[in-house]
Image: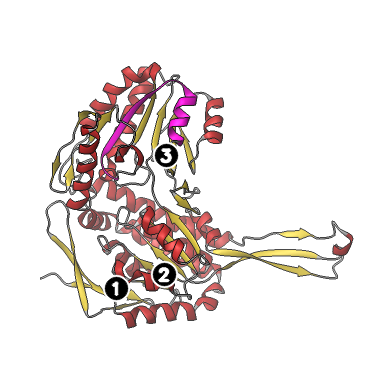
Amino acid sequence: MTSTHAFWLAGRQATGETSFDVTNSWDGRLVGKVSIPTEAQVEEAVAAAYAVRDEFAATPAHVRAAALDHVSRRLAERTEEIALLISAENGKPVKWARGEVGRAVSVFRFAAEEARRFNGGEAQRLDTDPGGVGRLALTRRIPRGVVLGISPFNFPLNLSAHKVAPAIAAGAPIILKPAPATPLSGLLLGELLAETELPAGSWSVLPVPNERMPALVQDERLPVISFTGSGPVGYSIMDSVPRKHCTLELGGNGAAVVLGDWASEADLDWAAGRIATFSNYQGGQSCVSVQRVIVDTAVHDRLLPKIVAAVEAQVTGDPSDSATDVGPLVSEDAARRVESWVDEAVSAGAKLLTGGVRDRASYAPTVLAEVPAGVTIADEEIFGPVLTVTRVDGEAEAFAAVNDSPYGLQAGVFTHDLQTAFRAHRALEVGGVIIGDVPSYRADQMPYGGVKQSGTGREGVASAMADYTYERVLVLTGLAL
């Protein structure tokens, strides 16, 4: 009999009156039962976080840093166990789940380092005008208040870490709401936080059903919302609370540009391998997954067959097998949606070069060419193991094609030319430009986020800490400067 997982209410375990099942999308087996907080328990968690906010903001940096270091170490010690848990609840191949745990280890370590050095301010002379003689301004960053962190299913551990770790580092209490499909990783994170000496009430992990989220979003005691997920949900949150501080990471339809100077056989093999891997890793369920490949005509005919061959070489199957590259999507409904978008494109004239087959929640790695404008897959984020290849004539046309999208998260540009790299950085309407690689590259300490419909604000530990805090100035008078 499967036991029911408790949730974490103000730093302690608790159970509600009902529960829900977490299942494996590969074989349908029950992974775990999760207790659902009652409305009274949610209120208790919010009230506790609100009550402790001043105390937590004043907690010495070494206390917060020690807690973050502890979580980082414990994640590293339990890597294999946690990777298997992520794979079971998410369907992610265990090879990628191990990488996710490693990234979360780094996120908590980075946060511990930032907690020790974070003051967020500076000294500023004010005697640049006569009225400021003898005055000095000092600034520091102050937590805005309790953070409501809403994490997605595709990186259930690491994107929870990107909510929790910066909040603790900045001294902001946090309530984490994990995705209903993948709550177990967030609950395990709570287990590690409970081993620390953080103040009671400074954190909770509440697997609240999505339909009960509006009340939490509207609660005035939660002035900061950090959301990662779909655009419609993210913008509905922002529109419903226009006076709150919202950080939204909403996805994209990542473009990889291969320009004419990326022309040697080694260059093209590298590009094809990276494109194939990062259009399909985690079933394509990543906001910076390669979806659009934009290729200069000078290298198109040589690169395209290499991409198809590299995609066909991806190993599909059981996500618990370390040899598997591509496992199932998070649900059969998700795979059916991918199937319908591909079928629509093919019916409209796109050429199916490989893939295009669904088996329950799995969808075969797929390459499409000559995709006509106006079909869904040309404009929207597919969030599946599908890429499209488009031929262009030169840099200007390639960059225009990247920008011809409602999204703007990251773009990759394969070029050896430094001037081209700087032009790409200036011209591309995205939050990040990756030179010599796919748009899927992310270092967890760097600023990460998008423009247009890809969201607002930035993740990355230091960037998130800035989002969770505000600048307060202190003016000292009568000084002999």
Q: Marks 1 and 2: which is nearer the front?
A: 2
Compare marks 1 and 2 and give the one earlier in the sequence. 1
Q: Residue furthest right?
A: 130
**What residue did someone put label 1 on?**
7
Judged from the image, the secondary structure of the residue bearing numbered disc 1 is: strand
Horizontal side, residue 67 vs residue 338: left or right: right
Q: Which mark is residue 217?
A: 2
Q: Position of residue 384 (x, y in %)?
A: 26, 43
Quarter of image, res 33 = bottom left
Mark 1 is on which residue type? Phe
What segment carries the magenta color?
383-403
Mark 3 surroundings: few (<14), some (14-19) or many (≥20) residues within 10 A? some
Residue furthest left as drawn? 1
Is 397 rendered above or below residue 155?
above
Look at label 3 and name its amino acid: Ser
Q: Mark 2 or 3 closer to N-term?
A: 2
Q: Nearer the viewer, residue 172 or 148?
A: 148
Residue type beneath disc 2:
Val
Q: Is residue 71 above or below residue 427?
A: below
Q: Nearer the viewer, mark 2 or mark 3?
A: 3
**Residue at 30% across, 23% down:** 304
Residue receiving disc 3: 405
Cα separation between marks 1 and 2: 19 Å
In the image, is residue 76 above or below residue 427?
below
Q: Residue drawn at (52%, 58%), measured in percent from left and top?
A: 113
